[in-house]
Amino acid sequence: MIAGLSLPQKALPPKYFYDSKGSRLFEAICRLKEYYPTRSELALTRGRIGEIARFAGRRGSPGITLIEYGSGDSMKSRLLIEALRPSAYIPVDISEDALRNAAAGLRRRFPWLDIRAVYGDFSRPLKIPMAQGRGRRVVYFPGSTIGNLTPEDAHAFLRMTCAQVGPRGAMLVGVDLKKDANVLHAAYNDAKGVTAAFNLNLLARINRELGGDFKLRRFRHYAFYNAAPGRIEMHLVSLVPQTVNIGSHRFAFAPGESIHTENSYKYSVEGFRALARSAGFEGEKVWLDPKGLFALHGLVAA
Ligand code: AVJ
């Protein structure tokens, strides 16, 4: 946090949004009528689950290990577990509460499944417990979380995942599509202000956990589509000249100066396939929701 706030363009990593309050706010975002990604991905996963499981499982292949990054409430993974019947499921998440609750629910629902929850940050190499056997490894990364990474970081992340699943291993990754800027704008500037509350909670969290003295009313949520890099940017804009303390550190804000809190990159089908290919994956399948808003890519490690 200190390092990010010391940059010329102040910036904080979006992974810190997800304390328990932030996770609840994010779940509320997912229910907003303007926020199409969750609903679109769920509809597409429900509608095509047979094909998706056939791709991931090559039908009948025994001992599949399903690894999910950013599993959250494991909502979509339930569908995939039912259809794919893996022998092991490894949910990885940075929100410990969400992870433990989801794992407990899945244990009741799928008593035959070996579940090993891993609490951690998947953007760094993690020690993943692997079920024994020669089964295929499948990484599931839904939700368009990959959009938080710059294309350079996404490339490195895909390379790491490619090595993790090994030759002929698979990855299912949810990616938000490029679309009309007005639709994007509405999704990140909802009328009820839930996204604004989600963004501002990052400052409240710094106050709670790091002894900061941010006055939340002196900052405003700001989100816009930056067409050149193809990303939504979220910022917190200082409304007045002010200084903020975090422990012994002081940060000055000019009026209008912002903290850049999130990028959410949008990709065309071909754009994402090219990125995946450059990282060692072949884009074998892609499924779109009926409205063409969201894509699920089926990648195979070359
Ligand atoms: C969880 C990263 C996919 O980028 O759309 C939602 C987070 N931020 N509204 C996204 C988010 C503001 C979300 N991801």
Image (tube, grey):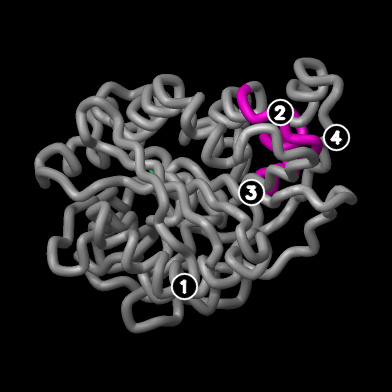
Give the mark, 4 or 1, whose residue is nearer the N terminus: 4
Q: Do the residues labelled 3 and 4 touch (CB within 8 Å)?
A: no
Magenta stretch containing residue 285, yes or no? Answer: no
Spatial CA span between label 1 and label 3: 16 Å
Spatial CA span between label 2 and label 4: 11 Å
| Secondary element at tag 3 | strand
Residue 200 visible here: no
* Residue kind at label 4, given as amino acid type: Asp
Spatial CA span between label 2 and label 1: 28 Å
* Residue kind at label 3, given as amino acid type: Val
Of 250 and 265, which appears nearest the observer? 265
Give the mark, 3 or 4, whose residue is nearer the N terminus: 4
Kindly identify the residue that appears in the image at 34 percent across and 64 percent down. Answer: 260
Residue 37 visible here: yes
* Residue kind at label 1, given as amino acid type: Ala
Graded by Cα atoms within 10 Å as few (under 14), some (14 to 19) or many (20 or more), the crowding at tag 3 reads many
Where is residue 75 shown, x and y percent of the image? 57, 26
Question: Residue 138, which numbered label?
Answer: 3
Of 239 and 64, which appears nearest the observer? 64
Q: Does the residue labelled 4 lie within 8 Å of ligand 1?
A: no
Where is residue 54 shown, x and y percent of the image? 55, 34
Kindly identify the residue that appears in the image at 18 percent across and 36 percent down. Answer: 186
Q: For mark 2, what is the residue?
A: 85
Graded by Cα atoms within 10 Å as few (under 14), some (14 to 19) or many (20 or more), the crowding at tag 4 reads some
Q: Which region is colored magenta?
A: 83-102
Give the mark, 2 or 1, whose residue is nearer the N terminus: 2
Question: Residue 114, which numbered label?
Answer: 4
Give the mark, 1 or 3, whose residue is nearer the N terminus: 3
Where is residue 108 shown, x and y percent of the image? 81, 17
- The nearer-to-camera label among 3 and 4 is 3
Q: For mark 1, what is the residue?
A: 279
